Amino acid sequence: MKTTNNNLTSKTDFIRQKITADLATNKNQAQVITRFPPEPNGYLHIGHAKSICLNFGIVSEYQSGKCYLRFDDTNPSKENIEYIEAIKNDVHWLGYDWKDNLRHTSDYFQQLYDYAIALIKMDKAYICSLTTEEMKEYRGTLQKPGKNSPDRNRSIAENINLFERMQAGEFEDGKLVLRAKIDMGSPNINMRDPIIYRIKKLSHPMTGDNWSIYPMYDFAHCLSDSIEDITHSLCTLEFEDHRPLYDWFLDTLNTPKHPQQIEFARLSLNFTVMSKRKLHELVENNHVNGWNDPRMPTLIGMRRRGYTPASIRDFCDRIGLTKNDTQIEVGVLENCIRGDLETKALRVLVVLKPLRVVIENYPEAQVEYLDAPYHPKDASMGSRQLPFSRVLYIEQDDFMENPPKKFFRLGPGREVRLRYAYFLTCQSVVKDETGQVVELRCTYDPQTKGGITPPDGRKVKGTIHWVAANHAITAEIRLYDRLFNNPNPGAGNLDFKEALNPNSIKVLNNCQLEPSLKTAELEKSYQFERTGYFCLDNIDSSPEKLVFNRTVTLRDSWAKKSK
RNA sequence: UGGGGUAUAGCCAAGUGGUAAGGCACAGGGUUUUGAUCCCUGCAUUCCCAGGUUCGAAUCCUGGUACCCCAGCCA
């Protein structure tokens, strides 16, 4: 999608081509106005991020750009105020600012009502008393045309009277609806006299008890776009066959503005689910621990996991924008966060699964401090002093009793470098009654301080991380893996929950961290050298008990090879 | 013959009649005190299929095929 790198980014997707062309012909007074219109009935996920980056991103590319954040709150039975606040937070976190362009569809309820009255007066809408079942029957099927409602020829005066009484609260929910009078024989089901208002005697989060009728999406959305003078109304593919209806309302009502709806393919990621229904189900049935579970594809979950706004924006740039029905590999996302954190994350030493090492030729009570840079390529990130002493912890995975020849780490008689410290040779192995290796007895080479090559020129192939036992901090670390085992959970007619990965979270309780991590900060990423990127858990971590989440592992060509 | 869409590599995706960009993945090589990073190199005689038009077709025409979406008083 990018034709050049970095700041010279120029995207040439079909929507931008269209906008550029419109600008060239001076359509819409050479303006570009978009909107991101979430329904406040759930948390935002990575799929919404695609839309946010598109709508907010695109207007920043043009001088005249403006993007509204508009809550599409036309259904009070599903929506609530908590979601509104959460969505605002997520949009800001992602890096976008709607400035003073915050709106709600409910802001236009009166105008929408007036438009409905206008439609009735044009004899283009009528009150229908068919029940839900009858309505379905009259609608016809995909193959067969529908038939006219018996109420279709109700008089304008009666329609107005009934509509006013619907709003006045005279009828129970579901008794009557207002329908557009279009064409029950249309091959497009959306045009078969769609419902535009229904009765819902419910308190609305924004308008309280002012209304007992609420407009439907198709009616409210195009008119809200028109009211806001949206130039390009970008939405996903499933609304493509609603476009004739979008245009019908605006044409019929002859609105001063007629925005153009353009559809693009929604994001689909493998090994995860994106539909709100499924995400709700995961949360409600406790398959995850809430919307902010780090395994969720929600923005709030990804944030907790350690994904940065920049990495998500980069992802949205890379995946492209087309009408193709595609499924992006999660590897692309992982690659984006690795790319971002590679330059930003402080490097630290942390042992996930400790194995005790005693250096037999190192003085008992001695402690020395070794200088270790926070980033191998960026000196401006500074350095810290790592305490080193006779008893250390190394990673269990860095030792094998009978290692294959290509294993560069520790084994009986083998020598490795302790990062920033010394060369270390394994002399013997201590086991418990069960035969488990519990300790390594080693020696170090005093001539390799700092990890340098000794005078005899001896080379060592592997470098491992470590932590001084007496100085280490103990912490909990949560290792996450993909939530589903199947690249396409729920494909076919399988229940997507069958594909849940039972090992999507692994909690390690005895992790040993270098002392500098005592002051680790929230919202900051750390690279635990050789293992991955981590961040403090923004819910469960406390100064007394640090809890880290693994954002993503480092690329590991050894793991790949050794399989 | 319900309607609306989409087909370019394992996954994305440029390409708009002039001889198949780029990214991810993958494979090989180099640098490296992270088996990371970084740096090279390779990776579609062919664009869903079949015909046709043309000096020339992924692009135009004709006919097929596959997949996705639509029958909420949801959005």
Image (tube, grey):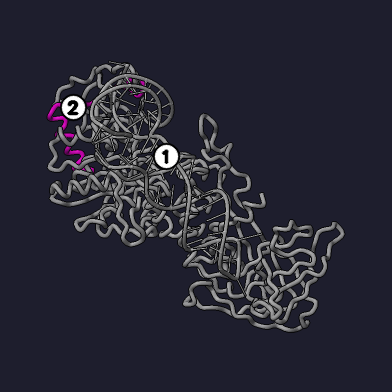
- Residue ID at (78%, 82%): A364
**Residue A513 position in % (x across, y down):** 63, 69
The amino acid marked with disc number 1 is: Thr
- Frontmost of labels 2 and 1 is 1
Q: Is residue A245 magenta?
A: no
Looking at the image, can residue A166 be seen?
A: no
Disc 2 to disc 1, C-alpha distance:
46 Å
Looking at the image, can residue A227 be seen?
A: yes
- At mark 2, the secondary structure is helix
**Residue A109 position in % (x across, y down):** 23, 43
Q: Chain of mark 1?
A: A
The amino acid marked with disc number 2 is: Asn
Query: Seen in the image, is A63 located left or right of residue A312?
Result: left
Q: Which residue is mark 1?
A: A326
Bounds of the magenta segment:
A109-135
Depth order, front residue of A34/A7: A7
